[in-house]
Amino acid sequence: MCQRLAKTYRAALSRGGVTALRGLDLAVPSGQTFGLLGPNGAGKTTLVKLLLGIAFATSGTASVLGRPAGDVRSRERIGYLPESHRYPPHLTGEQVLHHFGRLSGLRRPGRTRRVDQLLRRVNLGEWRSVRVHKYSKRMLQRLGMAQAILNEPDLLILDEPTDGVDPIGRREIRDLLLEQKARGATIFLNSHLLSEVERICDRVAILKEGALLREGGVADLTRPRSAWQVETRAGRPDAVAGAVARVPGARAVDGRVEIEGDVPAVNSLIDALRGQEVEITAVLPRRDSLEDVFVKVLGEGETP
């Protein structure tokens, strides 16, 4: 998607300008859901703008769907939901979708059928004739998702799609994204909600101050480490403490026992618990969450 991509913005108070991207190399596999992560100021929104042709790179190259970034033919196959999307307040939800449908080249009567289908899909059918200034944040986000997938895009670029949305709204958006993935669309997602990214993304990239710190599959980045969690039946804290005291590296945490080590180490813990007649209900390998990985990578990453 991009090779040695760099972007520096001119700044009146900075002689060298403000660098937003630093020689970024990144590829997004077709048909996958790709998450772009990073703190504020990492360059995520700048990268999205470069891919859409809204901004231009200082150096390096970017391509989208086999065409140069910003190419008209590639943009016809892209659906885009910006972070702060605003629609003319005097338009109804139905009028908004027809407006964007015309911009996407959709013609009647196919456009009418598609608009009707999407309004019903995002549960706005009864609000189709209501002006959007009366829509809640959740409703506007659902309308935005309908607008982004209106032309059944091959590539869906979403900038903070669940920002400010309640848990029910996040689930609705997640279901829509999974539907798009199931039909073969590639999804490029920029989000601060790491739990949502972990649930729906195949791969992620972590940026800091315009530089790529880590990229990989979510399953690989959060793979189980050499640590175990042993859950026990409640009610015998003294017996659990006695078993833990006999096993190096074991510790009791919030009603469970954790241990760092290999299989023989966890077997020793299990034997010690059974020796104290503690009932074991589960033995689970511990894995880092995507949030754990994110915090660790940012902590290790040097400032470019």
Image (cartoon, rainbow, N blue to C red):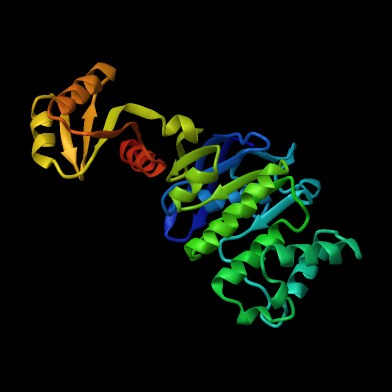
Q: Is residue 22 visible?
A: yes
Q: Is residue 185 visible?
A: no
Q: Is residue 78 left or right of residue 224?
A: right
Observer-nearest of 257 and 147 = 257
Residue lying furthest top = 264
The quarter of the rendered structure image containing the C terminus is top left
**Residue 216 versus residue 173 in the image, above or below:** above
Observer-nearest of 102 and 196 = 196
Q: Residue 143 placed where, x, y %?
A: 66, 67
The quarter of the rendered structure image containing the N terminus is top right
Q: Residue 239 placed where, x, y %?
A: 10, 35
Q: Is residue 27 left or right of residue 275?
A: right
Q: Which residue is drawn at the image coordinates 59% and 57% (left, top)?
A: 173
**Residue 40 versus residue 214 in the image, above or below:** below
Total of numbered circles in the picture? 0
Q: Residue 157 placed where, x, y %?
A: 64, 51
Q: Which residue is drawn at the image coordinates 8% and 32% (left, top)?
A: 242
Q: Residue 122 placed where, x, y %?
A: 67, 64
Q: Which residue is drawn at the image coordinates 57% and 66% (left, top)?
A: 84
Q: Is residue 223 left or right of residue 33?
A: left
Q: Is residue 80 left or right of residue 260?
A: right
